[in-house]
Image: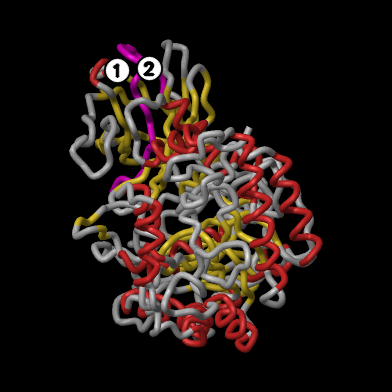
Amino acid sequence: MNLTFKACATAFALLHSTPFLTAAEKEKSMDKMWGEKEALSIEAKHPSLKWFTHDKYAMFIHWGLYSEMGGVWKDKTYYGIGEWIMHMAEIPVDEYKAYASQFNPEKFDATQLVKLAKAAGMKTIVITAKHHDGFALFDSAASDFTVTKATPYKRDLMKQLADACAAEGIRLGFYYSQNQDWTEPYGGEYKGERPKDYTPDDFNIYFEKKVIPQVTELLTNYGDIAMVWFDTPGDMPKTYSERLVKLVTKHQPNCLINSRIGGGYGDYVSLGDMHIPPVRPDVGAWETVDTTNDSWSYAWYDQNWKSPKTIIERLVKVTARGGSYMLNVGPKGDGTIPAEAVTSLEESGKWLKAHSEAIYGTEGSPFDQGFSWGDITSKGNDLYLHVFDWPEEGTLRLADLGANIKSATMLHNNSKVDCSQQGSTLEVKLGSQVGRDLPIVPVIKLTLDAPAVVKNQATQVDGLTPVTLLAEMATAEGCEEKGYRWMEKFGEWKHDHFIQGWKSKDAKATWDINVLEPGQYHLSLEYSCENDAANSEWILSCGDESITFITYESGADSTKSFQPGPARQRNFKVNLGVLEIPKAGLNQLKVVPRKLIGEGIGIKGITLKPYR
């Protein structure tokens, strides 16, 4: 059975948190939207994964008729995910198609766009050749709803971009919505009235007459294609995904396919939108897709631009967990990129040029998780310590690397950094940041006498910097660790994990910690608590030392926002007190109920900060 109108409506309802969906239904719908659960078993060995895992960084581009609208339809602003404005504003198919007469991107400069990607340090560009609205940015014999036939512009935008990419040595990929097509009577979630004799099996008409011909055109008319980035497979039968795989392989054997093709196919896994995982995913080759502000396509109201430092940090975090990062820009309808995005990309690109060896070709961190001060990438015997927040003590501690230090230098100027090693613990002595001319994100290059291999993946508590133990890092017994995601504000996705489902006093959550400096630590807790579970009592312990605390109702976000649906529980951050950790080495932090009143409690994380 293909993705019917009801299934697609249910999936988008998830995006907007509609009240008729249970939590289980929401998670199931999102799995269908992105094809995630099927993709998690991928063990692909495509030869092109070599460049994919080496390059690390790509540009995503969301551009179409919705960009000309910029979030506005008939003088009304629709806040949310910009490229879904046809859905949000319930624009009739005929009116939406007629709007193509206003799309005339005369200021589009493919060479300038490609040079921006190059200046940013990106190696590949992937653009929305056809999004869910069915409009094609390329010339197509399979449809009249294209830039060459339906707009005054009349020129093939993808041909211009392909030529510019070839000239500048940048790889090119195409986004293609293979399932949803809101302007095709037989496509997924058609926005008009279906033919009277329509049945779900008629999806095959759309697939044969539009999808296969258009994907073939993209594969055969634009030279070498690095990847086809499919999206929202939904309930589309596996046989359709299989046919697309064979089609891509036939025409472009070196072309990669992402996991959102559905059916368990794909050469690498695309995580949920904007997901920066705090713990290394166990999914083989993977990527995170993110955007320079909050919306994917251009929206006049979205001014929440990521700074150069934020872009660098998110690139490093993804790279440190072994992934690749694809960062989106949303051109305006005229083809120009917002100046704020250009500035952030150019400035972060300058940093990347000076620190390229710490990103390209790296193998991720030897640690499964990052640190409060920053994160680590590695290559052979070298570790690259990316310092997001300069530590108060001016010192970084790392333990159990399985190798000895040979040298330490600042990567940007090769100046020497003092280091010492006591047993398995390494100290990097940075000193004060005051008065020093440092990059946006300083990087210390550590050269060891062998590749670092961290066998003890317990979270390191170094006695100098704060440490947060997240739900994803816990072992749960009699309760469960569960992830949640939701869309906020202008279309950006949020991701949280909680320890929840506390059904008895025997339930517990434990975190293994490797304590480098025993002593007193100040503990704080981030959690959510529903009204009927308020005043539950808890014990947090490490060995014989413990703290007792109470969880109060955390409240809920207002339902009076642009998103309809039920309120979502807020998170509370509370101070718990000071706990003594008496011994160095492996310890276990444990949370158990003392007096459990209700199940609606979710523990997101516990932060330990050295008590001075």
Placement of 504 over or under 88, stated as above or below: above
Q: Please tell me how crowded label 2 is: few (under 14), some (14-19), or many (20+) other residues with Cα within 10 Å.
A: many
Q: Say which element carries label 2.
A: strand
Which stretch is magenta?
591-612
- What amino acid type should be assigned to the residue bearing mark 1? Glu
Q: Quadrant of the N terminus?
A: top right
**Residue 336 coordinates in the image, percent (x, y):** 37, 79
**Residue 280 coordinates in the image, percent (x, y):** 58, 48
Task: Based on the picture, tell me whether residue 206 belongs to the magenta stretch.
Answer: no
The residue beneath circle 2 is 593
**Residue 131 coordinates in the image, percent (x, y):** 50, 58
Q: How is the image coloured?
A: secondary structure
In this image, 460 relative to 93: left or right? right
The residue beneath circle 1 is 537
- What amino acid type should be assigned to the residue bearing mark 2? Pro
In this image, 361 relative to 463: left or right? right
Q: What mark, if any, has residue 425 been given in the picture?
A: none
Q: Please report the residue visible at 64 percent of the width from the left and 75 percent of the height from the top.
A: 171
Q: Please report the residue visible at 69 percent of the width from the left and 56 percent of the height from the top.
A: 212
Q: Please report the residue visible at 62 percent of the width from the left and 56 percent of the height from the top.
A: 210
Placement of 605 over or under 307, stated as above or below: above
Q: Which of 398 and 556 lies nearest the eye of the viewer?
A: 556
Q: Quadrant of residue 544?
A: top left
Residues at discs 2 and 1 in contact (Cβ within 8 Å): yes
Q: Which of 8 and 280 lies nearest the eye of the viewer?
A: 8
